[in-house]
Amino acid sequence: LSGDTGDRPLAGRHVIVTSGPTHEPIDPVRYIANRSSGAQGTAIAQALVALGARVTFVTGPATVPPPAGVDLRAIETAEQMRQAVEGALPADAAVLAAAVADWRIESPAQGKIKKDRNGAPPALSFAENRDILAELSRPGPDRPALVVGFAAETDDVIANATAKRARKGCDWIVANDVSPGTGIMGGAENAVTLIRADGAETWERMSKPEVAARLARRMAEALGHGTA
Ligand code: CTP
Ligand code: CA
C-alpha cells in the first residue's frame, strides 16, 4: 500500500463504524431505544479519518453531530443498520460502537395508538433483532480482517465482555462500565478495557477522543502487521 507509513497509516484502508442508538417504532409517533449519545463512535470515526482511513459511518439518531470526512449513512432501526453495514462491505476493519436495540416491536401499528382504549394500556410483543456484530464476525470471504465490538456492562465487566467476545467471534472487544455512578454514559470521558485473544488491557480514564485516538492507533498497527 502506497500510503502505509508515517502519520497516515490507514491510507487506502476502508473501515466501517456504527454509532448511536437505533430506534424501533411502536407506531408512527413512538419508539423504543437504547441510551446512546454517539460520542464515542463519532470520536472513533474521526480518529480513523485522521489516520487516513476511508470511513463508512452508519449511525442511528445520535445526540452529537456526525464527524466530518466520512461516508455518512443515517439509519433508524437495527435492521436498517444491519443492511447498511452489509451494503458497505468489503472493508478492512469494522468498529461496531452502536447501542443496537436488542428487540423490535413485532408488528408496529400503522396508525397512532390512541390512549383512550377503555383504560387498557397496549400490550407490545417483541421480536429479537439480528446481531450485526456476530454476523459480521462469522468466517467468510467478506469478513473484515479486524472486527472490533463494544461491551457496555454494569456488572462483572471483564468477565462478561470476555465471554461476549468469544460468543460473537469478533477480534477485539472494548469493554466499559456504564453503571450510573461512573458518569460515562452521556459524559465526556471513558474508562475502557481492550480485550483481545491474548488478554485484557485496562486503560486509564481519559476523554472519549483520547480513547478513540489510542484505539485507532492500535488498529493501524494490527492491520499493518497483519496480526489482528
Ligand atoms: N450489537 C450488534 N447488533 C445487535 C446487538 C449488538 O451489532 N443486534 C453489537 C454492539 O454494537 C456491540 C456489541 O454487539 O458492539 C455488544 O453489544 P451488547 O448489547 O453489549 O451485547 P448483547 O449481545 O446484545 O448482550 P446484552 O445486551 O444482553 O448484554
Ligand atoms: Ca444488547
Image (cartoon, helix red, strand yellow):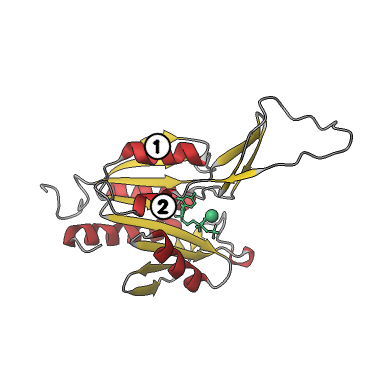
Q: Nearer the viewer, residue 95 or 71?
A: 95
Q: Does residue 192 appear anywhere in the picture? A: no
Residue at horizontal 17 percent and vertical 62 percent from the top: 225
Give the SS element for disc 2: helix
Residue 205 vertical position relative to residue 3 in the rendered view, above or below:
below
Number of numbered discs: 2
Q: Quadrant of residue 57?
A: top left
Residue 224 vertical position relative to residue 16 in the rendered view, above or below:
below
Which residue matches tag 2?
133
Whether the residue under disc 1 has CB within 8 Å of ligand 1: no
Quadrant placement of the C terminus: bottom left
Q: Which mark is residue 143?
A: none
Whether the residue under disc 2 has CB within 8 Å of ligand 1: yes
In the rendered view, does 151 fall on the left or right side of 140? right
Q: Where on the image, by quarter, is ligand 2?
A: bottom right
| Amino acid, disc 1 | Ala
The earlier-in-sequence mark between 2 and 1 is: 1
Coordinates of residue 19 in the picture (x, y in percent): 45, 46
In the rendered view, does 47 fall on the left or right side of 125? left
Which residue matches tag 1?
84
Q: Nearer the viewer, residue 110 or 37?
A: 110
CA gap, disc 2 to disc 1? 13 Å
Residue at horizontal 37 percent and vertical 52 percent from the top: 95
